[in-house]
Image (cartoon, rainbow, N blue to C red):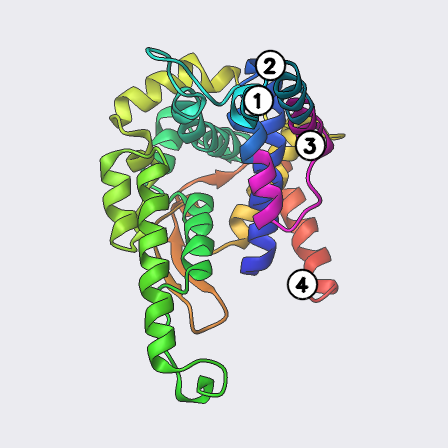
Amino acid sequence: MGMFEDRKNAACDRIMYCERAYKESSNPYYVVAALDAAHWGEFTPPEWALNVLLDANRAAMRRHVETGERISIDAALGLAVGRGQRAPEHLAKKEIAERPAFVLVKTILACFDAAIPDACEVVYYAVARDFAMEWQEIADFHSLGREWKPDWSNLISADEWKARQAQGCAEFKREVLACGENEAVQKKLMGHRWWEILHGDRLGYSLDNFIERYYRFGTKSVVPSGRVSEQQMLMFKGHSLLMTPDGCATSVTYRHQSGYALQGVSALGKFKMRSDFEDLHRRLSKVGADSGL
């Protein structure tokens, strides 16, 4: 699976998750996050998020007309908070880090003969791949890590490229500081080491705590599945993990110059596949091979 398809899948999962999370919490952060995912995933913005945003826009305009106050979409949407209140993005922070980790654990349990503590340990020490992909996209947007080439001279000079990168570095730093991640994660982002960020880094607490929280909350979480059952959706996710060499890998090597190639060794090989999943994986692999995918 290529980087483009990975980005599409990650964006789709984020949009589906944000829709469910917004319905449960009414936290406006998920509206903004869904629209952002649609942008970097190159999808049409989801209708539900657009409707919420347009309703906020209408409310802000009405308040401006009625009171003469400045137009504030943030206030109308619920992003602006008063003194002593926690910002919506901070309220969502823990769930945002936990949700993908919980889904990975559920995926492993649905597809392999694994105990919950063992599945949690694999996920805890695995690279937070979708998160790293998002930051790779951000870095690419700011032209970070790319050297100027002489054959670019007719488009941009070396000095202009250097100036662009300096500006990009400053903008990237601002995005890192505003991302709401913990200090350990921000340190790796600042060092351009997003492919070294593990789920455990993002969680910010111990493996034992993660196992406990999975029993308390992860087992009750629902994975958006559309028209198929949750079990089927999890097995499809399990197939994608096996088709991705770096899926659930403790370390990943990213090679920008070789077609966005990722290299890593998955930790899933330690588990035996469940028979129903093994059959599905075999059939889907055959379909992919027959179609040249």
Residue 239 appears in the rendering: no
Give percent across and percent down for residue 72: 54, 25
- 114 sits to left or right of 110: left
Q: Label 2 near label 1: C-beta < 8 Å?
A: no
Residue hosting label 1: 77
- Estimate the spatial distance between the alpha carbons at disc 4 and disc 3, rounded to whole Å: 34 Å
Between 201 and 136, the one nearer to me in the picture: 136
Check disc 1: other Cα within 10 Å, few if <14, some if 14-19, many if 20+. Answer: many
Residue reaching furthest front? 68
| Label disc, if present, on residue 50 of the rendered structure | 3
Specify start and end residues of the magenta stretch as a single range: 34-56
Q: Give the amino acid at mark 1.
A: Leu
Which structural element holds mark 1? helix
Quarter of the view holding residue 287: bottom right
Dot 4: within a 10 Å radius of its alpha carbon, few (fewer than 14), some, or many (20 or more) residues? few
Inspect the image, locate mark 4, and give the three-letter code of the amino acid beneath it: Leu
The answer to which of 228 and 171 lies nearer the viewer is 171
Badge 3 marks a residue whose secondary structure is: helix
Using the image as rendered, state which of residue 19 and residue 9 is in the foreground.
19
Residue 57 percent across, percent down from the top left: 65, 27
Q: Nearer the viewer, mark 3 or mark 2?
A: 2
